[in-house]
Each structure stands twice: as C-alpha cells, then as structure tokens.
Image (tube, rainbow, N blue to C red):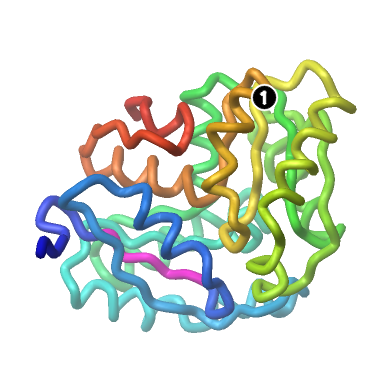
Amino acid sequence: MSIDYGDRARLGLLVPSGNSVAEPEIRAMLPQGVTALVTRLELRGSSEAELLGMLAALEPAARLLADARVARIVFHCTAVSTFAPHLAGEIRARIEAATGLPALATADAILAALAVLRARRVLLVTPYIAPVHAREVDFLAAHGVAVAGGEGLGIDSNAEMARLPPATIRDQALRAAAAAPGAEACFISCTAIRSAELIEGLEAALGMPVLTSNQAIAWHALRQCGIGDAVPGFGRLLTLPG
C-alpha cells in the first residue's frame, strides 16, 4: 500500500460547505507527492447574501489550515471570488494577514490560465442563475477578457449542481461553440459541477483549450508551489508551465 502524505506540497483548500465535487476532482489532478487538505466555509445557495456570507469565517478557517503547515491556502469558490473585480485580492490579503502564508483564489487561477492560454475571447458555460453568470461576464470584461457566448443553466444550489449530468454540460458547451464562432477557449465555470471528465473530449471536439474551475486551481496552485509536472488526462492547461 502506498499512501500519499503530500511530502512535496500540501495545498490547503477552503471550499463551499455544499460542494461535494471539488475535492475528488482536484485530488485526481495532483501529481504524486502533492495532496489537498480541506476546510469548509458555509455556502449552499447562490444569493448575494449567501455568497458574500461565505467570507464571514474566512480567517478562522484559514488558520485551521495553517496549523497543518500547508504550502498555500486556496480560497476555492468561483462565484464568490469573481463577485467583483477587487474581491479576490481582498480575500488573499485577509488570508495572508491571518496566517502569514501565501494565498490564492479561484479568480486568480482563471485569469492566470487564460493568460498562459493567450485567450482573450472565450465561451462562458456555467450552471449559475442569471445574476451570478452576469457578474462573471463583468469580472472577465474588467480583466480584458470578452465573453463571446455561452449561458447559465439557472441552478441555485451546490447540491443541484453536483447532480448535473456531465453530458448536459458537454451539450451546453457544444451549443455555445456552435452559436458563437471565434472564441479562443471554452471556460466551464463552477467548482461544484462534474466537468473534469469532459475536458479532453471537448478540446478535441471544439478545437480549442477547455478550462474548468477545478482544473485551473490545480494548475495554478501547483505552479505557484514551483511544481511543473504535466498531469495527463485533464486537458492542455495541465501540461503547461506557469
């Protein structure tokens, strides 16, 4: 028996309490010697109050991860970290002040991934209700990334998102690509949907890189820790340097 204790790096993840997908997907994307340790912050739905309320216990939760001597603390929720252009920076600053450890957020990973992929015009495919999807469009625009097409599915809770069949997400991405030619990447947003298994097939079908929230955070956290391993099976991004 071989047990991976994360002797190369331990990543500390802060995930929504209702999310049952991010952990297994991210752990599948980490190379040997890297592991993820997880703490939860309360979030089940998608209202503005619920999303911003996830930050209420940010510092104590981050300090619990710091006790485990993690290499980075990762705030991993797309809808919260992209809520406003400045919010990811504020989240990082709060975590770093509370723990003395370097931090990053899902929004940071998304922007870094789009930069390394040289994608400034994207399809945005989400499970979100309309206000959350629209805020993400605005977030990307604020950082110079145009959304060429795509849609949300109107799903409100993490539990519902986790039950979404991967085939539904695949079909959503294919519809978006057919309706909006000229995109340079397809971004399947949300940490709580089962999208990891779709990446390589969609890249082949669409002829463009496919980015997901969990894939982006795995790649960005690894590269921030100085780990450049290519991880096969999850698309082009996880083969690229930082």
Secondary structure of the residue carrying numbered label 1: helix
Q: Amino acid at mark 1?
A: Ala
Residue visible at 38% across and 77% down? 39
The quarter of the image holding the C terminus is top left
In x, y percent, where is residue 157?
A: 72, 74
Q: Residue furthest front?
A: 1
| Left or right relative to 80: residue 106 | left
Image position of 183 with respect to 233: above or below: above
> Please, what is the dominant secondary structure of the magenta stretch?
strand
Nearest the eye: 163 or 151: 163
Q: Is residue 14 magenta?
A: yes
In x, y percent, where is residue 117?
A: 52, 23
Q: Quadrant of residue 1?
A: bottom left
Residue visible at 27% across and 70% down? 99
Q: Which residues are magenta?
A: 11-15
Residue visible at 16% across and 61% down? 4
